[in-house]
């Protein structure tokens, strides 16, 4: 029975010599892009299943080796007819007297006709889906015999506020997993977690939850800090802009500056120019056992838009008396 050939390498956007690490990275990137909970466009769910099927084959050295025996000349969408030695639509693994026989017909399940022709019917597990979203099959994709799910690490992302990165926080969150139901199909389930965010985490920090990944592997949470309305984050340093009056910049002044936990007094030296950056040591993100970041304060000189009569007189007197030429 002819079926459409599936180019699993093309599905994941990789070349045939790709390493297992490259395959895993490509799968994670594509699965995030097309996950139905994140992508509501038409066809996203079908594409998500194609990606999971491709990863199910290419992540497993034995399946990948069998798949690669077809050669590199096939193109996605071409008709593929099993050779005569496959037994007219059946494929037996394990050699004479052993293994299991799979038919190419049957229910659609989670896999394409091509997958079931080459690797078996829907009793196989889509463990590739679990590689990012958890779960995975407890049955062997080669014959349905129950086997423990291999431990594997997983990675997800957690978003926190800048204040939570500064002080630390206890967060509750949940992740969606594709897991095998008692009926043998794949279904979405949601699992809740409690995680402690240590004070001083930065963008890109990874928090490890031991034994919370697939098959009792570890779950790694990559921290993403939300953009703050006032402060910008650069590593452990925080940056903000403070407005000062012309006379404060010229004569010097003590100004109040907000930080993440309080307000502090900062000295603006006499003769400070607009754009000059002043530093408050240790007012950035903390670092356990190390030096905390700093608060970098950029000065912006602002002038009143509406001058009173006396203010105008004083500015005019200053203009007459001052020898300062800013453009010389």
Image (spheres, rainbow, N blue to C red):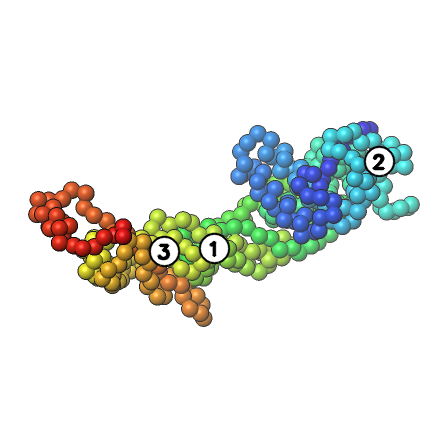
Give the structural element (helix, strand or loop) at label 3. strand
Q: Residues within 10 Å of mark 1 (few under 14, many from 20)?
A: some
- Please provide percent x and percent y for residue 3: 78, 30
Q: Residues within 10 Å of mark 3 (few under 14, many from 20)?
A: some
Q: Residues within 10 Å of mark 2 (few under 14, many from 20)?
A: some
Instruction: Identify the residue under disc 3.
Output: 239
- Looking at the image, tell me whether mark 2 or mark 1 is earlier in sequence order: 2
Q: Quadrant of residue 129?
A: top right
Residue drawn at x 68%, y 43% is 14
The answer to whether 134 appears left or right of 121 in the picture is left
Residue drawn at x 37%, y 63% is 294
Instruction: Identify the residue under disc 2.
Output: 90
Asked if residue 258 can be seen in this view, the reply is yes
Q: Quadrant of residue 277?
A: bottom left
Q: Nearer the viewer, residue 30 or 304?
A: 304
- Looking at the image, tell me whether mark 1 or mark 3 is earlier in sequence order: 1
- Please provide percent x and percent y for residue 158: 49, 51
Instruction: Identify the residue under disc 1.
Output: 203
Q: Quadrant of residue 198?
A: bottom left
Marks 2/3: CA–CA distance = 66 Å
Q: Nearer the viewer, residue 98 or 202?
A: 202
Does residue 46 sit above or below 239 in this rendering?
A: above
In this rendering, which labeled residue sits more in front, label 2 or label 1?
1
Marks 2/1: CA–CA distance = 52 Å
């Amino acid at each position: 029975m002819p079926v459409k050939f599936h180019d699993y390498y093309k599905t994941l956007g990789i070349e045939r010599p790709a390493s297992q690490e490259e395959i895993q990275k490509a799968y994670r990137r594509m699965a995030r892009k097309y996950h139905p909970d994140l992508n509501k466009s038409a066809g996203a769910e079908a594409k998500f299943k194609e990606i999971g099927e491709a990863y199910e084959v290419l992540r497993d050295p034995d399946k990948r080796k069998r798949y690669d025996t077809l050669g590199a000349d096939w193109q996605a969408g071409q008709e593929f007819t099993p050779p005569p030695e496959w037994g007219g639509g059946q494929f037996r693994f394990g050699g004479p007297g052993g293994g299991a026989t799979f038919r190419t017909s049957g229910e659609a399940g989670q896999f394409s006709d091509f997958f079931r022709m080459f690797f078996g019917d829907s009793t196989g597990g889509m463990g590739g889906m679990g590689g990012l979203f958890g779960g995975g099959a407890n049955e062997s994709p080669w014959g349905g015999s129950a086997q423990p799910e291999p431990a594997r690490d997983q990675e997800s992302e957690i978003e926190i506020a800048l204040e939570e990165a500064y002080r630390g926080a206890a967060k509750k969150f949940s992740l969606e997993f594709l897991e095998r139901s008692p009926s043998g199909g794949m279904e979405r389930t949601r699992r809740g977690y409690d995680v402690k965010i240590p004070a001083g985490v930065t963008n890109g920090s990874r928090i490890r939850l031991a034994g919370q990944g697939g098959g009792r592997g570890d779950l790694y949470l990559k921290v993403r800090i939300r953009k703050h309305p006032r402060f910008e984050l650069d590593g452990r340093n925080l940056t903000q802009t403070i407005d000062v009056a012309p006379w404060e910049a010229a004569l010097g002044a003590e100004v109040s500056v907000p930080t993440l936990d309080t307000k502090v007094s900062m000295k603006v030296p006499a003769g400070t120019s607009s754009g000059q950056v002043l530093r408050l040591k240790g007012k950035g993100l903390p670092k356990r056992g190390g030096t905390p970041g700093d608060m970098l304060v950029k000065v912006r000189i602002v002038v009143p838009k509406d001058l009173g009569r006396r203010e105008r007189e004083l500015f005019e007197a200053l203009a007459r008396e001052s020898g300062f030429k800013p453009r010389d």
